[in-house]
Image: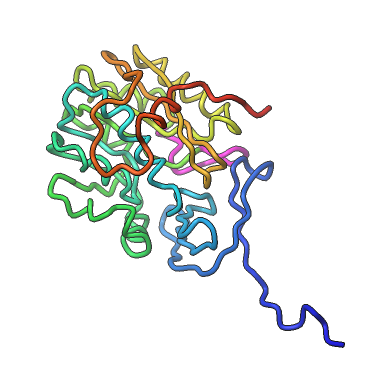
């Protein structure tokens, strides 16, 4: 009798950490569609059986085709709808193009400056995941700067109505991360200087259920600089179920209910906006 496993194809799997080696997702990888090592990091796009294409930086998931719209719509529109008049925006990071895609939905926006340190991330997104940017890099309102955002903001003389910080996390049990300088009081003091009156800044703040320490640190840093600070969240399965955000302003607060939302949104509506404002119903032990 032959071996029942004879001829079986060995599957390739990928472990996506939510909290180092303590918690994560294991997904089947069908193919690697982009792979490069830049001056700063390893960039990969893999085709998976359940999440669609996934963008990885140094092995950490940045987005998946399955749910990136939930993350990007929440990151951008929840605070953007509370900006009195959104004309000028600054994007820190966001090389995949999802943030600029969502900002371009706002008809009042006249200019978007995007600062990304690693041009290879943009290349990977355009080549392997073009739906994420949706052509936004070609919008004449978008001005791209390939440089260090810390230095860019420190030297900036423009005023922005909205600043979106979409940089990589500082991961537990790792040191020397690329975005480390962007998680500092000094950086946010510079952001505050370039914010227009009533303007908002928002940053991703990790998984607030399984990595609550990251969200607390973000709130602490914002509270040292901005008069008004708050958090909200959304559902992102590829991030371990949840993604947290922290916002700051010197003259505004988030609306308790959804305002006039741009057309074409797939995740954010009155129900998910209300959910974003509620405290999460559980917090994992640290």
Mark yes or no: residue 146 visible.
yes
Q: How is the image coloured?
A: rainbow
Residue 48, how many percent across, how many down? 52, 62
Q: Residue, x 37% and y 55% (percent of image)? A: 121
Q: Nearer the viewer, residue 33 or 241?
A: 241
* Residue that appears at 38% across and 40% down: 267
Q: Quadrant of the N terminus?
A: bottom right
Q: Main secondary structure of the magenta part?
A: loop
Establish if 258 lies above or below 263: above
Q: Residue 229 lies in magenta, yes or no?
A: no
Q: What is the x, y in percent for residue 193?
A: 25, 21
Report the residue at 22% width, 17% height from top: 198
Residue 165 position, x and y percent, is: 35, 35
Q: Which region shows up in magenta?
A: 170-182
- Residue closest to the eye, 157 or 222: 222
Left or right of 187 on screen, residue 142: left
Is 183 placed left or right of 91 in the picture?
right
142 relative to 66 in the view: left or right: left
Whole-percent x, y for residue 108 in the image: 13, 34
Answer with the quarter of the image where residue 163 lies: top left
Residue farthest to the front?
271
Q: Quadrant of the C terminus?
A: top right
Name the quadrant containing residue 234. Answer: top left
Residue 286 appearing in the image: no
């Amino acid at each position: 009798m032959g071996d029942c496993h004879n001829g079986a194809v060995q599957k390739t799997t990928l472990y996506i950490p939510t909290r180092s080696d303590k918690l994560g997702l294991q997904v089947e990888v069908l193919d690697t569609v982009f792979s490069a090592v830049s001056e700063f990091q390893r960039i990969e796009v893999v085709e998976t059986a359940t999440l669609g294409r996934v963008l990885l930086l140094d092995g950490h998931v940045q987005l998946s085709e399955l749910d990136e719209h939930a993350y990007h719509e929440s990151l951008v529109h929840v605070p953007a709808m509370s900006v009195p008049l959104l004309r000028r925006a600054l994007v820190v990071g966001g090389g995949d193009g999802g943030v600029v895609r969502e900002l371009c939905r706002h008809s009042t926006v006249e200019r978007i400056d995007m600062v990304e340190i690693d041009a290879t991330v943009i290349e990977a997104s355009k080549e392997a995941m073009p739906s994420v940017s949706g052509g936004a890099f070609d919008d004449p309102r978008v001005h791209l700067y390939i440089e260090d955002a810390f230095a860019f903001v420190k030297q900036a003389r423009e005023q922005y109505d909205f600043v979106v910080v979409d940089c990589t996390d500082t991961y537990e049990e790792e040191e020397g991360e690329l975005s480390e300088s962007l998680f500092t009081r000094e950086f946010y003091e510079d952001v505050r200087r370039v914010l227009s009156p009533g303007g908002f800044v928002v940053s991703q703040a990790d998984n607030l259920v399984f990595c609550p320490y990251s969200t607390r640190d973000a709130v602490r840093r914002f509270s040292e600089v901005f008069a008004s600070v708050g958090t909200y969240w959304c559902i992102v399965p590829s991030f371990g179920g949840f993604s947290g955000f922290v916002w700051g302003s010197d003259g505004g607060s988030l609306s308790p209910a959804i305002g006039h939302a741009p057309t074409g949104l797939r995740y954010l509506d009155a129900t998910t906006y209300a959910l974003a404002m509620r405290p999460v119903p559980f917090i994992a032990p640290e």
